[in-house]
Image (cartoon, rainbow, N blue to C red):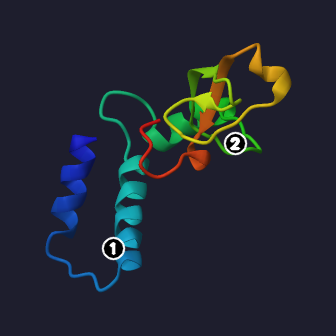
Amino acid sequence: MLLAERWIIARLRDRKFFSLGEANAAIRDCVAEINARPFQKLDGSRQSLFGQLDRPALRPLPAARYEFATWRKATVNIDYHLLTEHPGVSSQFSDAARGGGLKVRGRERRQGGTA
């Protein structure tokens, strides 16, 4: 990575870009050139090895997006509210005796909460 970074910066240091898209296009061209460059001691290039080794092993992205969540141990208070960092979370009557865990997903977090 360091070699590619330095090579791209050296190639583009005297150019002026007037938009982010223009800069990205120039970087994309440099990366394509680096990937197509043949190895010094091996046969092929980065691009050919990617096509032979990595591309067949790739799988499609999952249909559902990854969602960060944390599990917290929660106890149910006498008023059926869960005792967690988030005030006001209540439980069903049937869950009150069980207690157990609480899954806190990223989008359900309230501002000011630590979890």
Q: In which quarter of the image is residue 16?
A: bottom left
**Amino acid type, callout 1:** Ala
Q: Which residue lies furthest to the front in this view?
A: 78
Residue at 21%, 64% in the rendered image: 11
Q: Where is residue 43 in the image (x, y as percent from the top left)?
A: 43, 31
Q: In which quarter of the image is residue 71?
A: top right
Instruction: Please indicate whether residue 41 sits to the left or right of residue 88 in the image.
Output: left
Instruction: Please indicate whether residue 31 sits to the left or right of residue 102 in the image.
Output: left
Q: Nearer the viewer, mark 1 or mark 2?
A: 2
Mark number for residue 45? none
Q: Which of 65 and 21 is in front in this view?
A: 65
Q: Which of 76 and 60 is in front in this view?
A: 76
Q: How crowded is mark 2: few (under 14 residues within 10 Å), some or many (20 or more)?
A: few
Q: How crowded is mark 1: few (under 14 residues within 10 Å), some or many (20 or more)?
A: some
- Residue 112's place in the image compared with 23, above or below, is above
- Residue 99's place in the image compared with 15, above or below, is above
Residue at 79%, 22% in the rendered image: 95
Mark number for residue 61? 2
Residue at 15%, 69% in the rendered image: 13
- Residue 67's place in the image compared with 26, above or below, is above
Q: Where is residue 31 in the image (x, y as percent from the top left)?
A: 38, 55
**Amino acid type, callout 2:** Leu
Q: Nearer the viewer, residue 11 or 17?
A: 17
Q: Which of marks 1 and 2 is nearer the N terminus?
A: 1
- In the picture, the quarter occupied by the N terminus is top left
| Mark 2 element type | loop
Residue located beneath label 1 in the image: 23
Q: Where is residue 30 in the image (x, y as percent from the top left)?
A: 34, 61
Q: Residue furthest bottom?
A: 18
Marks 1/2: CA–CA distance: 28 Å
| Mark 1 element type | helix
Q: Quadrant of residue 26?
A: bottom left
